[in-house]
Image (tube, grey):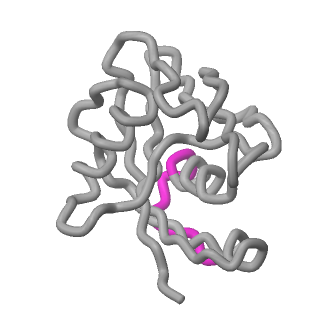
């Protein structure tokens, strides 16, 4: 078994809201920020830009790494161990679109202090790190 490295990207609009998607497929029915697995040879920033373009059709600029989280609860529940590199980007304008409806079927802008449930562990961890201005939270 290997450990998978992914990115999670918080996209913030001018009102301080963050963009969330409702997952379908294997991660249903969880709400989550967007992101995905890092490809070999790819920087975290390149991965964030690619995943956001693929998933919701936005061209984010200059995403910033602010933390990492080790998603142990998901490992215990699913047997899949992921480490998430957390990035933040400002909404570049334009409407996000559901580019992969088999992975996500709903988009909302949300107050980060009032997250919808159920919420994906990696997303909850990333949002908590960002809100608390921390780089890492031990399990």
State whether the magenta stretch is mostly helix, strand or loop: loop
Membership of 20 in magenta stretch: no
Query: Is 104 on the left or on the right of 49, as rendered?
Result: right
Is residue 91 shown above or below 123? Answer: above
Residue at left offset 44%, top offset 53%: 36
Q: Position of residue 100 (x, y in %)?
A: 51, 33
**Span highlighted in magenta in the image:** 130-139
Figure quadrant of residue 43? bottom left
Q: Nearer the viewer, residue 44 or 127?
A: 44
Residue farthest toward the top in the current orientation of the protein? 94
Q: Quadrant of residue 94?
A: top left
Where residue 13 appears, as percent x and y from the top left, is 46, 20
| Residue drawn at 60 percent across, 58 percent down | 122
Q: Residue at x 60, y 37 (%)?
A: 102
Residue 52, given in percent of the width and then of the height, sits at: 38, 36
Q: Position of residue 123 (x, y in %)?
A: 60, 50
Question: Would residue 6 be found to the left or right of residue 119 on screen?
Answer: left
Q: Residue at x 52, y 24 (%)?
A: 98
Near-viewer residue (132 or 2): 2
Question: Is 33 placed left or right of 63 in the picture?
Answer: right
Q: Nearer the viewer, residue 56 or 17?
A: 56
The residue furthest bottom is 1
Residue 134 drawn in magenta? yes
Q: Residue pushed farthest front? A: 102
Q: Quadrant of the N terminus?
A: bottom right
Q: Quadrant of the C terminus?
A: bottom right
Which residue is outermost to the right?
Answer: 117
């Amino acid at each position: 078994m290997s450990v998978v490295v992914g990115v999670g990207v918080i996209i913030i609009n001018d009102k301080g809201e963050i963009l969330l998607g409702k997952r379908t497929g294997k991660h249903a029915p969880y709400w989550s920020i967007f992101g995905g697995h890092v490809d070999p040879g790819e920087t975290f920033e390149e991965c964030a830009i690619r995943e956001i373009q693929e998933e919701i059709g936005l061209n984010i600029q200059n995403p910033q790494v602010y933390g990492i989280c080790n998603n142990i609860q998901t490992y215990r529940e699913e047997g899949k161990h992921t480490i998430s590199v957390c990035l933040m980007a400002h909404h570049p304008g334009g409407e996000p679109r559901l580019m992969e409806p088999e992975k996500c079927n709903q988009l909302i802008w949300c107050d980060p202090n009032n997250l919808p449930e159920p919420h994906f562990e990696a997303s909850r961890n990333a949002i908590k790190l960002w809100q608390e201005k921390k780089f890492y939270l031990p399990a």
